[in-house]
Amino acid sequence: MTASVTGIGALDPTLPITPQIYRILRDRIIHNDLTPGNRISESEIAALHQVSRQPVREAFIKLAEQGLLAVRPQRGTIVNKIAYSVVLDARFLREAIEADIVSILAQSPDAGLVSNLRKQLDVQRALDPKDSSDFIHLDERFHFTLAAAAGKGGAWKQVEGLKSQMDRVRYLSLSQFPVAKLIGQHEAIVDHIADGDRRGANVAIRTHLREVLSDLTQIVAAHPEFFDLPAGELPQPVNAPIL
C-alpha cells in the first residue's frame, strides 16, 4: 500500500534539505503514522516540496541504514517492520553508553546541571499523565542533557540512531506508558548524581532503561503485524548484571 506523504510538514529553504526530510520521515515512522509495508515515493516527496530527488534519496538511504526503510531498486521503498532482535541489541548498547555517562557526571557533580535536571523533573511532573507522547519528548530532552553535560553529545547522536526501533515500540505502547514510574526513576538518577554516588547512578540508569523490557512481549502480542520476529520462541534479553 502506498502511503500518502501529504502534510508531512513544510521545509525551511534556508536549511539543508536532506536532514529535514530525514527527520520528518523518521518521526512519522517512529510515531507509526507510516506503518510496516507502507510504500513511500521518492518522486512524490520531491515533487511535493519542489526539490530534486537527490536529497530525498539521501534521506531514504540514512533511514534504511537505521533499519526503518527497505530501499528496493525497481520495486519501490517500503517501511520495514520492527526487528525484535535489533530492539534488544539497541537497548543493550544504549544502556552501556548511558551507564558510563551518569558515572562520569556523578564523579564530579555540577550544581548547575543538577538544578537544570530538577527543573526538568518539575516540568515532567506538571504534565498530564495521559500525555504520554509529550512525555517522550521531555524524556528525550532529559537524556540528551545528561549526555551533553558529560561531553558526550556525539555519543548521543549514535544513541539516537540505535534507538529508532525502540522508539517505535514506545509509541505502540503509549496507552500503558508508566509516566509516574519513569519520572520517579529520573528523580533517582538525578539524586545519585547530586550525591556523587557513581554506583547508585549506574544502577538507577540501568533499571530505568530496562523498563521497556517488562512489557515487550505483551506489545509484540498486541501488534504482531508490526514486528519482524525470529523463528521459534522469542529470545530473552541478555543484560549486564546490576552490581
Image (spheres, helix red, strand yellow):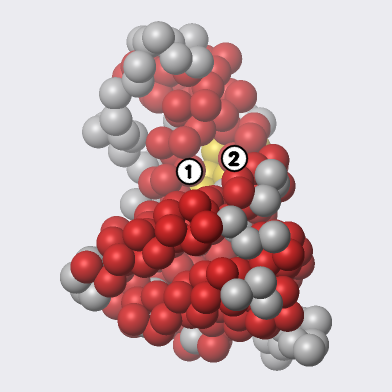
Name the quadrant containing residue 164.
bottom right
Q: How far is mark 2 from mark 1, CA to CA?
A: 7 Å
On the rendered image, what quadrant is the C terminus found in? bottom right
Whether residue 93 is visible to the viewer of this picture, yes or no, is no
State which quadrant residue 107 falls in: bottom right
Is residue 47 positioned above or below 212 on the image? above
Secondary structure of residue under mark 2? helix
Q: Position of residue 83 (x, y in %)?
A: 64, 65
Residue 217, percent across and down? 55, 86
Q: Which mark is residue 63?
A: 2
**Quadrant of the rendered image containing residue 75:** top right
Percent position of residue 93, x then y: 74, 64
Circle 1 residues within 10 Å: few <14, some 14–19, many ≥20: many
175 to the left or right of 16:
left
Residue 50 in view (yes/no): yes
> Could you say which is closer to the camera, residue 125 or residue 84?
125
Q: Which mark is residue 26?
A: 1
Amino acid type indicated by mark 1: Arg
The reply to whether dot 2 and dot 1 touch (C-beta < 8 Å) is yes
Amino acid marked by disc 2: Leu
Of residues 102 and 63, which is closer to you in this image?
A: 102
Give the camera-side residue of 232 and 196.
196
Horizontal and vertical percent position of residue 46: 42, 18
- Residue shown at 35%/59% (left/top)? 119
| Crowding at mark 2 (Cα within 10 Å: few <14, some 14-19, many 20+) | many
